[in-house]
Image: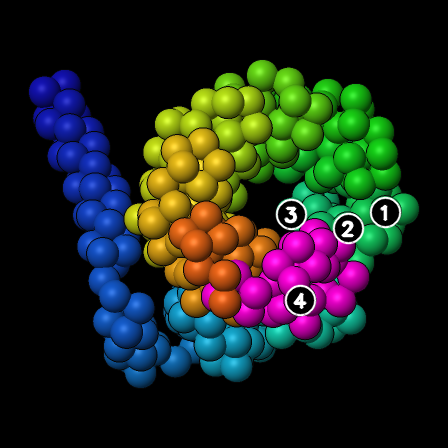
Amino acid sequence: MYRIIKILTVLFLTVLVISCGKKQSEKDFNKLSDKEKIDLLDAKIRKDPKNAELYYQRGKVFAHMENTKEALFNAQKAIELDKKQVKYYIFEADVLFSRGETTLAFNSLQEALKVDNKSTEAYLKIAELSLYMKDYTKSMDNIKQALTIDKLNPTAYFLRGYIMKETGDTARAVIDYKKAIELKSDYEKPFEELGLLYAAKGDGLAVEYLKSTININPKNTNAMYALALFYQDHGAMQEALDLYKRILKIKPADADAIHNVGYINYEYKHDYVTALDCFSKAIKADNSYIEAYYNRAKTYEKLNKKAEAIQDYQKVLSLNPENQDAKTSLKRLGK
């Protein structure tokens, strides 16, 4: 009996060591730079050139590097070596779609369903691509197929919610987004969408959902911007400024965030020097930013720099000849 227990213990420890070794290996791999990952996978492929999974992994790295040509080659090589792996076709479809080859992407997903007609991921990818093409009927049909197979799939509810939003049924969209969150509590996208929907209505629930989005993904600058704008629109200027500055730490050239910092300094703090600097930086980040030119012109006026103000108002009209505010301002300044 003791011997049997000893053998089982050894087997358990062996499995545990192998499992931990694999996890450690994956962790170590993820720490590598993309170039280091490619070098490692190149070496492995030289030793095992018929291993489809290695090509798939290498393709994923190339996709992360935005090298779609190499990503596609590796996806197709993986499929050539193993035609029974649904994920290879789905990856190929992702790469093709990123290259603008939508029809071929759909074809790849149809091939995936030939391999496994119960693949919810393939159905939902078709739904997602159809949604992008604004083919809501096709998208909904594929979502229904996915829910028939897996009625608790959070992605299906999110996509259905998005269709509801796009087609004007925001009440139903809210229901589906909340169902997606119920099924996956750290699902970033429905939190963000709910935040945006509530913000559009001026509903304070926007704060809760956008904060949750940021907690899930501290680099989601879209959610930060939406929350900052909500704060700004509701008089919480310091909270808005804090978020705009947080955005700028992640994206230093974000023209909208820079502009809005300038606007708060102009409109509420009456700090025209800081405002002028911000509007100029926003223009540098986006030289067709009409609002930045217009607000910089107003700031120049506050600083008694009439010639510079006139120049910026004229720039506004060169970008938008119908801008009545700029026309009125130029008339007032005698131009």
Q: Is residue 161 magenta?
A: no
Q: Secondary structure at mark 2?
A: helix
Please tell me the numbered disc located at residue 131: 2
10 Å neighbourhood of mark 1: few (<14), some, or many (≥20)? some
**Disc 1 target residue:** 136
Residue placed most toward the observer, 37 or 323? 323
* Display coloring: rainbow
Tell me how far mark 2 sits from mark 3, CA to CA. 15 Å
Q: Are marks 4 and 2 in contact (CB under 8 Å)?
A: no
Mark 3 and mark 4 lie on one chain; the one further toward the N terminus is 3
10 Å neighbourhood of mark 3: few (<14), some, or many (≥20)? some
Q: Are marks 1 and 4 in contact (CB under 8 Å)?
A: no
Mark 1: amino acid: Tyr
Q: Is residue 315 magenta?
A: yes
Q: Secondary structure at mark 3?
A: helix
Mark 2: amino acid: Leu
**Disc 3 target residue:** 121
How many numbered dots are placed on residues in this image?
4
Q: Position of residue 123 (x, y in %)?
A: 73, 48
Mark 1 and mark 4 lie on one chain; the one further toward the N terminus is 1
Q: Is residue 186 left or right of residue 172?
A: left
10 Å neighbourhood of mark 4: few (<14), some, or many (≥20)? few
**Disc 4 target residue:** 335
In front of the other: label 3 or label 4? 4
Mark 4 and mark 2 lie on one chain; the one further toward the N terminus is 2
